[in-house]
Amino acid sequence: MNKEIIVTIKQLEQVGYFASDYIIDALNSALVLNKPLLIEGPAGSGKTWLAKALSHLKEWNLIRLQSHEGIDEDKALYEWNYRKQLLSLQSDIDGEKSIEDIFSEDFLIERPILQALRSKETSLLLIDEVDRADEEMEALLLEVLAEDQVTIPELGTISGSHNFHTILTSNSTRELSDALKRRCIYLYLDFPEISREALILSHHIEGLDKNDSEKIASMISYIRKLNIQKPPSIAEVADWLKYVWSKDTGLGERNLKKNIGILIKNNHDQKVVIEEIENFNNKQ
């Protein structure tokens, strides 16, 4: 085992990410085996945050590809600089340029995946929300994930520098193909358990002690289990507390309902949460 590349819980805590043993095991297996890590889970559970924390900890260049419907190789892999090609042909007075001349490295625009493949320094390729892309995009990724290479018809096969690691995230809006999953280490990242979320909140909210952070984390865990359309993310909880938390009075009855729009982004959900927060507090 390459002990120099593995990470520990304490190391990630130094850059503000509070991981569990389960997360660390999956992350280290991907790093040691040099295989892509597929992180699947609800939106806001810390998937992208983990990738950013790792790149910060290791001081790796983060190359991010944000997936979306209709994304293709022009945005993900490479693109030809058609304007430059056209100008080159127009300036070729003697007509000596051939098709091969204008489909060369000089006219190639590297997109995130090709940038990572050819990176001279160790990089982390983050393919974010891959479930938002079409199945055709998944097919494009298979060669990269399995063989660390990409084929450009005009140039041939370009092998990677073996100098990058890959993390893919998915919000589970659709089922990913078995072919893609087979090429990855799989990590399901749910919202953190109460004790871990309490640590996260204590780290981000000044003056929030252990007892208060556990009470708030317990309340947030209760809210996420309600019949609401969009459970609050970790970042939304932290932002809400930064606004409503008082070191002297804590949350307080009034503050619990104060600008709930930071925490809950749906009118129906807000009504449910405000009512249930009161029920939760009465049970405490």
Image (cartoon, rainbow, N blue to C red):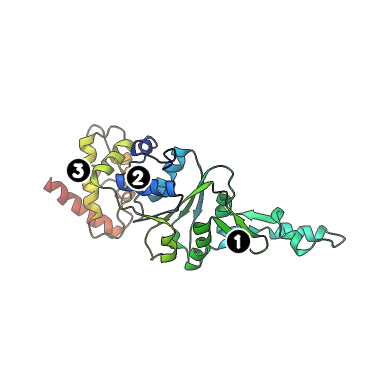
**How far separated are the C-alphas under marks 3 and 2?**
38 Å
Q: Residues within 10 Å of mark 3 (few under 14, many from 20)?
A: few
Question: Which residue is the site of mark 1?
Answer: 151
The residue located at (81%, 61%) in the rendering is: 97
Q: Residues within 10 Å of mark 1 (few under 14, many from 20)?
A: some
For this rendering, which residue is in front, 69 or 284? 69
Question: In the image, 264: left or right of 250?
Answer: right
Q: Is residue 85 left or right of residue 2?
A: right
Which residue is label 3 attached to? 253
- Please give the residue where the numbered disc 2 appears in the rendered image: 24
Under mark 2, the amino acid is Ile
Which residue is farthest left? Answer: 283
* Callout 3–callout 1 Cβ contact below 8 Å: no
**Residue 171: which quarter of the image?**
bottom left
> Please, what is the three-letter code of the amino acid marked with disc 1?
Thr
Residue 219 % position (x, y): 21, 47
Q: Is residue 68 above or below residue 236?
A: below
Dot 3 amino acid type: Glu
Instruction: Tell me where residue 272 sits by quadrant.
Output: bottom left
Label 3 vs 2, first from the N-terminus: 2
Tell me which residue sits at (21%, 51%) in the image: 222
- Asked if labels 2 and 3 touch by Cβ distance under 8 angstroms, the answer is no
Q: Is residue 177 visible?
A: no
**Residues at marks 3 and 1, CA–CA distance in whole angstroms:** 61 Å
Marks 2 and 1, the one that precedes in the sequence: 2
Q: Nearer the viewer, mark 3 or mark 2?
A: 2
